[in-house]
Image (cartoon, rainbow, N blue to C red):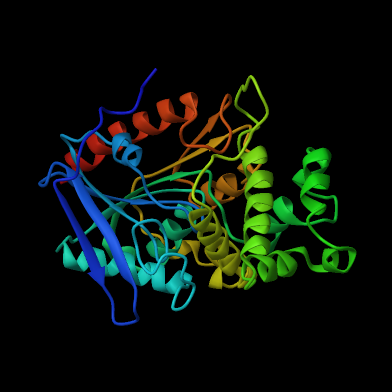
Amino acid sequence: MNDLYPELEPFATDVLELDDGHSIYFEQSGNEKGLPVIFLHGGPGSGCNENHRRYFNPDKYRIIIFDQRGCHRSTPNGSVENNSTQDLLNDIESIRNKLNIEKLILYGGSWGATLALLYAEQYPQRISAMILRGIFLARQCDFEWFASDDMHGVNRIFPDYWQEYLSLFEDREKDDLLGSLYQRVFSKNRETQCEAARAWSLWAGRVVTHSLSFDKAYVLDEEDDDKLINEVKIEMHYAKNRYFIEENQILDNISQIPDVPITIIHGRKDLTCLPESSWSVHQALPDSEFIIIADAGHLAGEPAMVDALVSATDKMADICSHAQ
């Protein structure tokens, strides 16, 4: 079974200074003359870490990683001003231009896959291949599956966890859970913000880790409350604005994606982003390779998923190298 490549340090780090007040952290590692691949992290609202470099053979890839607006090392941290999906797509294009790269391999999971598909539709001439994991299509049905109280979603599988999450809200708030969570996490009251961010993160974490074997129940990491609040603020900002795209926009515009090698990987046990989403993209792009991983859920770090992703990047390196 494949494991992640050994730890490596970036050979260059930089910041994209933008006129709208945002500073975007990005880095490069691996082979400066290798195949350029850009890693698109999930969320919205999370960020990149040192392990994200390790899905790629550093001898063959020029690995580009960046923290999206307001995330992790990008500043101002947690800012939702001038922070939309189109802004993120513009940032990808600005990084590509700054690095003087003609074409990119796009690698993204979950929300990162959303961005990869949208970028490929907007800039089809700028991509050479795509590797997508656990696709999130950002439709209303995709968010409602995860966070609606109509009992037609994942809450039916985890009714106890869902009830605990609902206990955060007063009865009058339950008619609009998204709006109520948004108001709480953007509250001027620090305790209210923290309580809301922790409740949402606990619910999401319990669902996303369900496919793993744990000796004890999932608990939140003891991390900086500011970081947690900022992550949830950005996530709710995007969700409340319907991810700044039209309903079903990705599938409606899928014909814009060029005929390049595309690998789509999804865990069979994924209850955060259902396999139907990746299957729909595969059906619309019949030349794509679709791989379902029986023993994996949503997380990229699950052993079976790591094995599949590293295999996919190795295979894609061979395909793209021969195409040059």
Q: Is residue 248 visible?
A: no
Q: Position of residue 173 (x, y in %)?
A: 83, 67
In the image, taking residue 232 as reference, residue 95 lies left or right, namely: left
Q: Examine the image and state in which quarter residue 211 appears.
A: top right
Hey, which residue is sitting farthest right in the picture?
Answer: 171
In the image, taking residue 34 as reference, residue 306 lies left or right, namely: right
Hey, which residue is sitting farthest bottom in the picture?
Answer: 19
- The residue that appears at 35% across and 44% down in the rendered structure is 49
Q: Position of residue 48 (x, y in %)?
A: 37, 49
Residue 205 vs 284, above or below: the answer is: above
Q: Examine the image and state in which quarter residue 102 appears.
A: bottom left
Q: Nearer the viewer, residue 4 or 308?
A: 4
- The residue that appears at 66% across and 38% down in the rendered structure is 206
Q: Is residue 26 visible?
A: yes
In the image, taking residue 299 as reference, residue 96 lies left or right, namely: left
Quadrant where the N terminus sits is top left
Q: Nearer the viewer, residue 188 or 32?
A: 188
Q: Position of residue 160 (x, y in %)?
A: 82, 39
In the image, taking residue 208 as reference, residue 299 lies left or right, namely: left
- The residue that appears at 20% across and 68% down in the rendered structure is 97
Residue 64 vs 69, above or below: the answer is: above
Q: Nearer the viewer, residue 246 or 187?
A: 187
Q: Position of residue 282 (x, y in %)?
A: 52, 46
Residue 140 vs 324, above or below: the answer is: below
- The residue that appears at 19% across and 45% down in the rendered structure is 10
